[in-house]
Amino acid sequence: MRRITPILSILAGVFILINCFMGCSSIDCPLNSRMLCVYSLAGDTLTDTLTVSTTRRDGSDTVLINRQTGIAQFSLPMSYDGTTDELLFDLHYTDATSSLDTVVIEKDNSPHFEAVDCNPTFFHTLKSVTTTHHGIDSISILNPNVTFDNSHAHIQVYFKKR
């Protein structure tokens, strides 16, 4: 019994230290705090090649989707606090021609807090979406609320018939 008491004391002390340093929380924070806007392509799946890019705040550009084909839907991240997002849709057709469209999304941003222990996220409310009409015929908002729920498309894209 004399040998068990020190061992139990040591184990209890280790358990307390682990809980102090690691913390104990029953809150599950989202792993990814970026909101994704879901784009649905009207009609059949895309047979041409689509590249989507945007410009960062520092002026450099970044490719979000690189040479995708055979898709009917895709998701793109939204900026945290910008009131507009500008995307370039570069479409390369099977006949070796291409078109470049600029899509501008105006939105309101609202901070969303799960808990004090979690990083804040931003939900977005889409106000308007406009495009140039080189390869895109029209574009419309289906669901203006961009949240963690990505089960429904937010924006519908109609490409011109070729």
Image (spheres, helix red, strand yellow):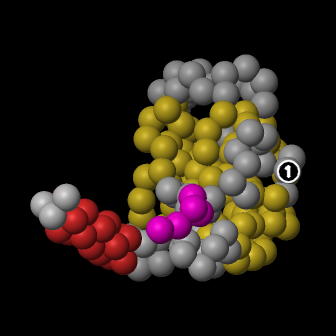
Q: Is residue 4 left or right of residue 92?
A: left
Identify the residue at image location x=49%, y=32%: 68
Identify the residue at image location x=72%, y=67%: 123
Instruction: Determine whether 28 is above or below 41 in the image.
Output: below
Q: Is residue 54 magenta?
A: no
Report the span colored magenta: 24-28
Could you tell me residue 35's position as x and y percent?
A: 63, 59
Q: Chief secondary structure of the magenta span?
A: loop
Instruction: Determine whether 117 is above or below 136 in the image.
Output: below
Could you tell me residue 158's position as x and y percent?
A: 78, 37
Could you tell me residue 155's position as x and y percent?
A: 77, 47
Residue 124 or 56: which is nearer the viewer? 124
Q: Is residue 132 left or right of residue 17?
A: right
Q: Quadrant of residue 161?
A: top right
Determine if residue 69 is in view.
yes
- In the image, farthest residue toward the left: 3
- Find disc 1 in the rendering and name its residue: 143
| Quadrant in the picture for the C terminus | top right
Instruction: Determine whether 101 is above or below 74 in the image.
Output: below
Identify the residue at image location x=66%, y=22%: 45
